[in-house]
Structure formats: structure tokens, C-alpha cells
Amino acid sequence: MAYDKFNILTSSAVPLPIENVDTDQIIPARFLKATKREGFGDNLFRDWRYNGDDTPKADFVLNNKTYSGKILVGGKNFGSGSSREHAAWAVYDYGFRAVVSSFFADIFKGNCLNIGVLPVQVSPEFSETIFKAIEADPNTQLEINLPEQTITLLATGQKESFDINGYKKNNMINGFDDIDYLQNIKGEITAFADKLPY
């Protein structure tokens, strides 16, 4: 399988209430030399996480042990900028399985769906509700239910639905990338090809 199956994710979340986070901030260009997906998590938000001497910046959220979890909650227009796949790879490799925002850049959103990170787009109002809940209690639990396409604040029961392409949804539930999907229907493809006149 290309990546972990995604069904229902229940986790605390890491808040990053910054708007217009672009892919160069997610993974700076100098770290794009590798072609495999591994190791990019070490440099996720590198210039925000570390000083020039590689010491951690104490005020950056990923260096704050108060916050943890498999869900990253970002500000509006998350993943703008260049189309680099490495940004989604870095998010996944760090350990996040979902990113929540009130708006995603289309290419970043597609790249996430291709590698097993679920982009959950919510209303600006619900996004603000989530940020306030995490601020009040860093252990706030979110439930992201992919089959039902809902995100819920478990403490209060507040819930919103989110949209996802049906093909991508099926792939994420099964842990498929595009190649895995084609391999899974290889028999159907062969049967169809055998009926074609030559």
C-alpha cells in the first residue's frame, strides 16, 4: 500500500493560526533534492522551527510540548505558492494525517490526497471555534470521520461536514495511491482489454 488507510481519526491537534502559509515555509526549497518521501518531516517548517545555528525556536508551536497529535490546524489559504509535492511529503513524514483549514490551495490539497494526508476544509467560523477550543485545552480531541465526511469537537459535539472527491475518498479509505488503485482493478482492465477487437 502507498500509505496508511484512513477511516476515523481521533486525535489532539497542533494549532498554527497563520494565514497564507506557503509551500516554501512548509518545506524550504533547499531541502528538495531528495526524490524519496522519507526524511522530509525533519525539515517541516524548518526556518520557523530552528535558528541559524540549528537550535529550536522555543516560541514555535512544533517545539512546544504542550501541543501534539496527528492533526495540524492551519490558518486560511494553507499550502499556497509553488506546486512542490515535497510540502505534502513533509507534513506526512512528520506524522500528521490530516490538515484542517478554512481554505486550501488546490495543488497542495491534491498533493495531500495523493499521499495519504486528508485536507479537511471547514468554514471560517468552525475553524475559529477549533482554535479557541485548543487554546482553552491543548488536549482537545477532534474526530475526523472520512466515511461520514465529518469533523467533530468531541468535548462539545460541535460538528461540520467537509467535501472530498469520491475517487480520492475511496483511495484514502483503502490506502491506495493511483498506481495501487489500478493494480486493484487489474482484473477488470484485463477483462475489458480482452473484449477489444484487434
Image: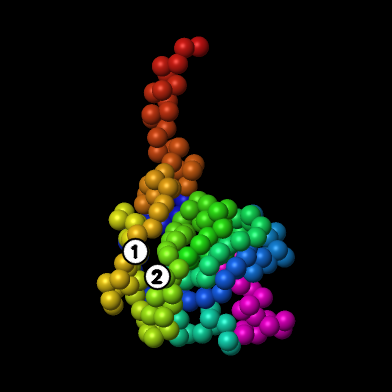
Please state the horizontal and vertical placement of residue 116, each as a whole percent of the image: 46, 56
* Residue at (37, 85) in percent of width and height: 137
Residue drawn at point x = 63 percent, y = 77 percent: 48
Q: Amino acid at mark 1?
A: Glu
* Left or right placement of residue 130 versus residue 25 in this view: left
Secondary structure character of the magenta stretch overall: loop
Identify the residue position indicated by label 2 in the image.
Answer: 126
| Residue 130 found in image quarter | bottom left
Q: Do labels 2 and 1 touch, CB within 8 Å?
A: yes
Q: Which residue is depicted at the point 57% across and 71% down?
A: 19
Q: Which mark is residue 160?
A: 1
Q: How far apart in space, not on screen, are marks 2 and 1 (Cα)?
A: 8 Å
Residue 39 visible, this angle: no
Mark linked to residue 58: none
Q: Is residue 41 magenta?
A: yes
Q: Residues within 10 Å of mark 1 (few under 14, many from 20)?
A: some
Q: Which residue sits at x=38%, y=58%?
A: 162
Tell me which label, 2 or 1, sits earlier in the chain.
2
By what rule are the colours in the image chosen? rainbow
The magenta-colored residue range is: 38-57
Check disc 2 and give the amino acid type.
Phe
- The image quadrant that residue 38 belongs to is bottom right
SS label for mark 1: strand
